[in-house]
Image: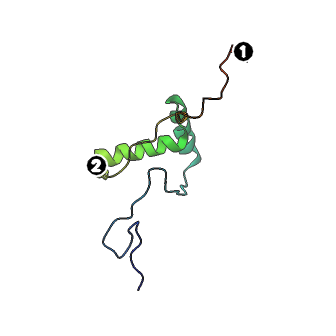
Amino acid sequence: MTPPSPEGGPGDGQAPKRSAAQRKQVLLRLDPLVHDALARWAGDELRSTNAQIEFLLRRALSDAGRLPGAAGPLPRRGRPPKSSGDDEDAKQPGEDV
């Protein structure tokens, strides 16, 4: 018998722990017209189709009282912020070297 992994998992009575960056991948088959409608809606709200699907699923789970309390927040839109060390050597526009 193997000891439980530090991340938890099946058989040890604990839910698996995931880092914030780890995301589940799923294959979703949709009617093409439904996909087109979702893609248009996502574009209207400046989201990717994938982000729109996750937004709608989370809203439906919340409305039904089934959203897990431990579910992390939706990832923020846009590019991640620069880390503090990234721009030290970067030249600013209009700067002479």
Q: Counting other residues with Cα less than 10 Å from the Cα at mark 1, is it few (<14), some (14-19), or many (20 or more)?
A: few
Tell me the quadrant of the picture where the N terminus can be found: bottom left
- Residue on which disc 1 sits: 96
**Nearer-N-terminus badge (2/1):** 2
* For residue 4, above or below residue 35: below
Residue positioned 49% across, 56% down in the render? 24
Residue positioned 41% across, 66% down in the render? 7
- Residue on which disc 2 sits: 64
> Which secondary structure, mark 2?
loop
Question: In the image, 20: left or right of 36?
Answer: left
Instruction: Identify which amino acid the numbered label 1 is placed on.
Output: Asp
| Circle count | 2
Instruction: Evaluate if marks 2 and 1 touch, with contact meaning CB atoms under 8 Å apart.
Output: no
* For residue 86, above or below residue 1: above
Instruction: Identify which amino acid the numbered label 2 is placed on.
Output: Ala
> Which secondary structure, mark 1?
loop
Residue positioned 49% across, 34% down in the render? 77
* For residue 12, above or below residue 26: below
The residue most toward the front is 97
Question: In the image, 18: left or right of 43?
Answer: left
**Gap between marks 2 and 1, in whole Å?**
58 Å
Q: Nearer the viewer, residue 27 or 86?
A: 86
The residue most toward the left is 65
Residue positioned 52% across, 57% down in the render? 26
Tell me the quadrant of the picture where the C terminus can be found: top right
Q: Position of residue 33 (x, y in %)?
A: 56, 43
Q: Nearer the viewer, residue 16 or 66?
A: 16
